[in-house]
Amino acid sequence: MSAVSPRLASLSESETLAMSQKSNELKAKGFDVINLSVGEPDFPTPTHIKDAAKKAVDNNFSFYSPVPGYPALRNAIVEKLKKENGLQYTADQIVCSNGAKQSVCNVLLSIIGKGDEVIVPAPYWVSYVEMVKLAEGTNVIVSAGIEQDFKITPDQLEAAITPKTKALILCSPSNPTGSVYSKAELGALAEVIARYPSIIVLSDEIYEHINYVGKHESIAQFDAIRDRVVIINGVSKGYAMTGWRIGWIAAPKWIAAACNKLQGQYTSGPCSVAQKAAEEAYIGNQECVADMRKAFERRKNLVFSLAKEIEGLQVNNPEGAFYVFPKCDYYFGKKTPKGNVIADAGDLAMYLLEEAHVACVGGAAFGAPDCIRFSYATSDENLVKAFDRIKIALAELV
């Protein structure tokens, strides 16, 4: 009998993509489904970025690019880090990949070996733990509940560290919670990490520009650990370029070289035309970023107020990204009008999809089984309609 490799068999399917697929199947059957399951801006890519891509095609950027990306793009990223973040890097510390997802995986495959432990704060983005499995590492989950705004404390971090700890994955602003670590909070975590010189920090900052509390703070700013921080970022969220697939790392030279070596064997450099578009994203006018951030903040305020009105949902006020992540265990054990029991957040998400025709994702996939994730990366009209449906459907549970 044919069988997939143990490596693949150990992986779970992405719950976010699975729910999106199920919502699309319902749509194909003619149902009016509002999809709040996928983390994707609903804005088109800004015109000046698309124009740069068209120009790249006309200028015959149609050949293989260098494995870590064109020097022009890497230098644009260096300037962005200097200007926006006050961080000093050189182009040989930047590796561009096919999206930030590949960037995260590159780093983990480059530094994690069998039995190495990776600390993953929960709630976490669904793919972190699966990528650690792929690298044959061991996930060490540190849970932070809604009562602490879904952010781990220095004491929690230190308690999780063992002689086998090789890495910490930190995401701020966070998917799935929208929580943002302040400079003081990051500094306190950095003090702990500084005491353990073998730990590498993967700082996922893909939502950097979707931040409602002012200046973005990176854990790479702290000198004591700067040479052990890998920044993960890209153009997908802040510039509405999800389909262009350009992500990147800013890393110590030895990690950048390792990722370059790895990427050279399994994908080579990312799309040439998309790189020229990403270069324009960084060097061009930034008004589009500010405009989209303002729209997301307005939607956040709308969704936060709508979710708070629903009995049984306990919701914190997100400070970034475009998700709300309410605690929903109030509904566990209740029955649907058809007599089915809601056992967990996955059942609740499926009920909302089938009965309210609103797609969302149960929290188990994010390491928080008492919660449920809604993305508000859609129109105000859709959000009002969706939460009206959700309120009605939840009120029917007994």
Image (tube, rainbow, N blue to C red):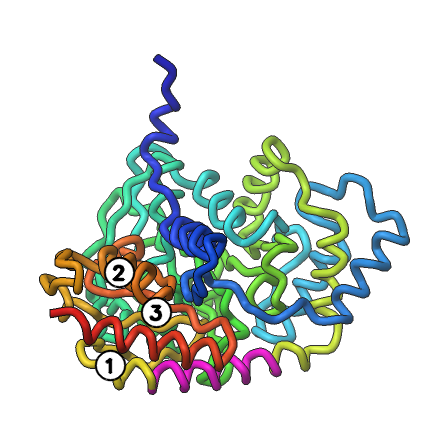
Q: Residue at x 49, y 65 (%)?
A: 205
Can residue 228 be seen at all in this image of the molecule?
no
Question: Which marked residue is nearer to the observer: mark 2 or mark 3?
Answer: 2
- Which part of the image, by quadrant, shows the C terminus? bottom left
Distance, label 2 to label 3, CA atoms, is 22 Å
User: Callout 2: helix, strand or loop?
Assistant: helix
- Which part of the image, by quadrant, shows the N terminus? top left
Q: Earlier in the sequence, mark 3 or mark 1?
A: 3
Q: 54 or 390: nearer the eye?
A: 390
- The residue under label 3 is 177
**Residue 217 bears which disc, if any?**
none
Q: Is residue 130 above or below residue 50?
A: above
Distance, label 2 to label 1, CA atoms, is 16 Å
Q: Is residue 117 above or below residue 236?
A: above
Q: Amino acid at mark 1?
A: Ile
User: Callout 1: helix, strand or loop?
Assistant: loop
Q: 49 or 216: nearer the eye?
A: 49
- The residue under label 1 is 310
Q: Earlier in the sequence, mark 2 or mark 1?
A: 1
**Residue 351 bears which disc, if any?**
2
- What's drawn in magenta, residue-wise? 291-305
The percent position of residue 302, horizontal first and vertical second, equals 41, 85
User: In the rendered view, does 54 fall on the left or right side of 93?
Assistant: right
The percent position of residue 246, horizontal first and vertical second, equals 63, 54
Q: Residue at x 34, y 79 (%)?
A: 388
Identity of the residue furthest to the right in this view: 59
